[in-house]
Image (cartoon, rainbow, N blue to C red):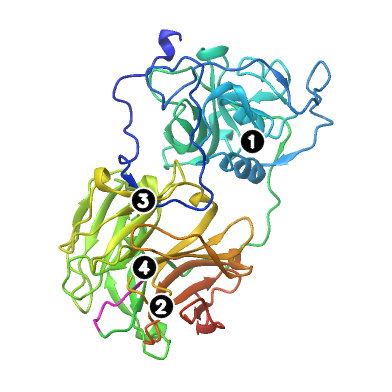
Amino acid sequence: MNTRHAAVAALIAGAVAAGTVVAVDTAAVAAPAAATAETPADPDYGSPGQGEEEAVDGEFRAASFAAATAPQITRGSVIARAKSWVGIGLDYNSGRRHGGYRTDCSGYVSMAWDLDFQPATNTFASRGVTEPITKAELKAGDALLDDDEGSSGHVVLFEKWANSDRTRYWGFDFTPSGVHHRVYDYPYYPGYGPYHPVRYKNIADDVTTPPAPKPGMTDLVAANINGDGVDDVVGVEASTGKLWLYKGASNGTIASGGNRVEIGSGGWNGMANLAGGDYNGDRKDDIVAVEEASGKLYLYPGTGSGLSSRKEIGSGGWNGMAELMGGDFNGDGKADVAAVEKSTGKLWLYKGNGTGSIGGGSSRVLIGSGGWNSLHDLVGMDVDNDGRTDVVGAETSTGKLFLYKSNGTGLNARTEIGSGGWNGMNDLIGGDFTSNANDDLVGVEKATGKLYLYPGTGTGLGARKEIGSGGW
């Protein structure tokens, strides 16, 4: 590898170190075979080499890429295809194929662009596949390309900017440590390159549709803030960043907007992935949340009427996690945190100690081996009232709702509890809103902004009931 492409020592740290595997998701991935290509100094970055340009499934185009006759692909489709390789255990090996495409950096981007042949980094332009663009023109589905050949070249698929200064961006690449969906320095990490923005000539902007109502509230969480035995709804007001409490009643209703209580005066739109539970053992539910700017995890102790000063319980890296859930997943009477690792799609459990802290990265436990990025709005809730928090989530590809029951050490095989249409819901939360011992599900209907309660039956969910008329 050329020295200008060598990794700088001690580059950005990865996600928190993995813990012991105790249970796996039903779609477990077989252990990958060892790569045959030479591995660079840091396997998280760059390319160890690529395969030769070749056809996919025997369909090779003419001498030059016929962009005018090739079918267009939308930007949204490119991103969806890129995500399909994330977290499924693929090993970087230019001599192997997945779905007909080489399992290397340029094969991965060829797959995302749905090409019927696979250029290498040094032939994307000469084959007429890409054209240069400016940094200001970058959109989802474009790429950052180092167009050298072999292990000196590399390509990263661009998704979106990660900050207002446009110095960091979300994207995808395939390196010796796997397929990554993560935040990159623009244009790529120090010590590699040079990289230039390029565009696939046959990419098309997505057709815009009338937007759904703007969310009035975001990051909803269920928590029994006032200690009355009925869960309340807590949420961030999108326009102000204030945190509001909607008190629950035992009949499954919540306080109206006129009766809500402000428990956070502002700045909560800088927090994400709110989760609730009694983390310090004082019988008052608390809130945990990730500070997006720093990646730190904070605990806001409940007081019985609101929240007190926050306490840092995770020093960083938590913006690499998604779908945080609070609950007692192992049934030991202490609130835990479960979350999906964005880069791998794995589901991890961080055990609570009952005194306001959770276990660090070295003690976290793997409870889902991969594919959890294919679900949205994961919820921690005790569906069957056995004292252990289960996981409920909507599958993006089908819109179905699935239940993963906790067995105390991990999760059982999933069961379907909602046949479809759940992609039309968001901000799902779970808790006992009806005081019948069975946890219920609450969620916002995207199209209308209405809030609905789905009563728990002990095995699934009953017919829904509107508990918020709009503006959610």
- Whether residues under marks 2 and 3 lie with C-beta atoms below 8 angstroms apart, the answer is no
Q: Of 100 and 425, which appears nearest the observer?
A: 100
Q: Which residues are magenta?
A: 219-227
Q: Is residue 388 left or right of residue 181?
A: left
Q: Is residue 189 above or below residue 83?
A: above
Q: Which mark is residue 22?
A: 3
Q: Which residue is mark 1?
A: 112
- The percent position of residue 4, horizontal first and vertical second, equals 42, 11
- Whether residues under marks 2 and 1 lie with C-beta atoms below 8 angstroms apart, the answer is no
Q: Which residue is mark 4?
A: 389
Q: Is residue 193 above or below residue 321?
A: above
SS class, disc 2: loop
Residue 210 shows in the view: yes
SS class, disc 1: helix
Q: Is residue 32 above or below residue 145?
A: below
Q: Give the mark nearer the N terminus: 1 vs 4.
A: 1
